[in-house]
Image (cartoon, helix red, strand yellow):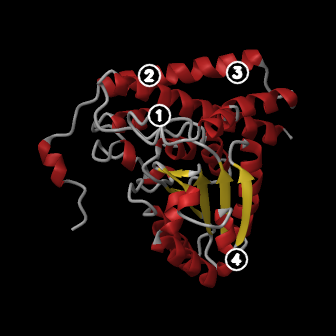
């Protein structure tokens, strides 16, 4: 029980880190201090935290253009994420990737791929490599509902199925691919309805409930490491912000938006931890303050970090 308690607290802490990190970078973006663009993960924090809490450092994940939540949950440091957002050489990708290409192999995160669905075959390939190398590791691919219409999604699921690969496919179904509602791109009610043709174990979870996500992911990881093959997890969720930059969400139904705004995963986590008598208001305040300090230190670290030199463009290339 003590171990479970520690895991629950750590998941909550990760969710707070993601929320505060994004609040900070978004305000700096609005102030004109942050170059490039931002794709906020707010509203989906429970998924990254719940999945990654089940993974070891040697397990790998692939991500999307909305990458910082996955990065922080997998153990990429706040300092290196912040520096990468601002294009500094101390960033996790040496300032070459920016917000859409976060990653750190040493933490078990393949640098994020902004191409829709691009990380799905990479995770599948990592799982195949683990099989050849006889490593008891698992690969996880995070992607949105829009990626399930990409050819590589279907090809990867079929490959993972027939070869029984240790891979977990995590669909963060936030109902929108950019501004397009999911009902306009598929006629089935749930993404999971497509999975039966691949013979893959699959479940739908409340993507805003960190305990539910954690529990389902734990079973999936255990299955993969026992040699029982891939799992598909559809996480029902909703992004609390626009797709990117100044997106005002004018295309979203206001009643739908109002309903989902009552399902803040951070507040849901707080209420559950209170009910379980694991944390109280003073504990939440303490965690907020500790995370705020880490964010401030990350900003200072970034501001004191140099930009890459022009010749760095030609370094770290695969020739």
- Marked residue nearer the N-terminal end (3 or 1): 1
Which mark lies nearer to you, 3 or 1? 3
Label ID, residue 297: 2
Label ID, residue 216: none
Q: Quadrant of the N terminus?
A: top right
The answer to whether marks 1 and 2 mark residues whose Cβ atoms lie closer than 8 Å is: yes
How far apart are the alpha carbons under marks 1 and 2? 9 Å
Residue at image point 53% right, 46% down: 70
Local crowd size for mark 1, using a 10 Å CA cut-off: few (<14), some (14–19), many (≥20): many
Residue at image point 55% right, 80% down: 159
- Marked residue nearer the N-terminal end (3 or 2): 3
- Marked residue nearer the N-terminal end (3 or 4): 4
Label ID, residue 196: 4
Local crowd size for mark 4, using a 10 Å CA cut-off: few (<14), some (14–19), many (≥20): few
Q: Is residue 1 visible?
A: yes
Local crowd size for mark 3, using a 10 Å CA cut-off: few (<14), some (14–19), many (≥20): some
Local crowd size for mark 2, using a 10 Å CA cut-off: few (<14), some (14–19), many (≥20): some
x, y percent for residue 118: 42, 63
x, y percent for residue 104: 43, 50
x, y percent for residue 25: 41, 28
How far apart are the alpha carbons under marks 3 and 1? 20 Å
Which element type, helix, strand or loop, lies under badge 1?
Answer: helix
Label ID, residue 284: 3
- 56 sits left or right of 122 in the view: right
How far apart are the alpha carbons under marks 3 and 2? 20 Å
- Marked residue nearer the N-terminal end (1 or 2): 1
The answer to whether marks 3 and 2 mark residues whose Cβ atoms lie closer than 8 Å is: no
User: Which residue is disc 1 drawn over?
Assistant: 78
**Image: 242 above or below 286:** below
């Amino acid at each position: 029980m003590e171990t479970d308690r520690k895991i629950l607290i750590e998941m909550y802490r990760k969710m707070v880190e993601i929320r505060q990190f994004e609040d900070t970078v978004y305000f700096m973006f609005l102030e004109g201090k942050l170059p490039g663009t931002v794709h906020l993960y707010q509203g989906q924090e429970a998924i990254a935290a719940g999945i990654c809490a089940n993974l070891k450092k040697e397990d790998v994940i692939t991500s999307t253009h909305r990458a910082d939540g996955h990065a922080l949950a997998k153990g990429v440091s706040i300092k290196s994420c912040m520096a990468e957002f601002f294009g500094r050489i101390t960033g996790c990708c040496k300032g070459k990737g920016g917000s859409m290409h976060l990653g750190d192999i040493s933490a078990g995160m393949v640098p994020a791929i902004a191409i829709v669905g691009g990380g799905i075959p990479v995770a599948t390939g990592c799982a195949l490599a683990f099989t050849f190398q006889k490593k008891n590791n698992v690969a996880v691919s995070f992607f949105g509902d829009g990626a399930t219409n990409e050819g590589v999604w279907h090809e990867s699921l079929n490959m993972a199925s027939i070869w029984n690969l240790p891979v977990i496919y995590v669909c963060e179904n936030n109902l929108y691919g950019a501004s397009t509602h999911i009902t306009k791109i598929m006629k089935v009610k749930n993404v999971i309805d497509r999975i039966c043709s691949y013979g893959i174990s699959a479940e739908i979870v409340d993507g805003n409930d960190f305990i539910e996500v954690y529990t389902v992911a734990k079973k999936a990881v255990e299955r993969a490491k026992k040699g029982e093959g891939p799992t598909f997890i559809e996480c029902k969720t909703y992004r609390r912000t626009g797709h990117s930059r100044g997106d005002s969400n004018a295309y979203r139904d206001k009643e739908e938006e109002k309903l989902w705004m009552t399902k803040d995963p951070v507040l849901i986590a707080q209420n559950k931890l209170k009910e379980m008598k694991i944390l109280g208001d003073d504990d939440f305040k303490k965690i907020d303050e500790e995370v705020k300090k880490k964010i401030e230190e990350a900003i200072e670290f970034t501001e004191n970090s140099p930009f890459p030199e022009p010749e760095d463009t030609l370094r770290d290339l695969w020739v």
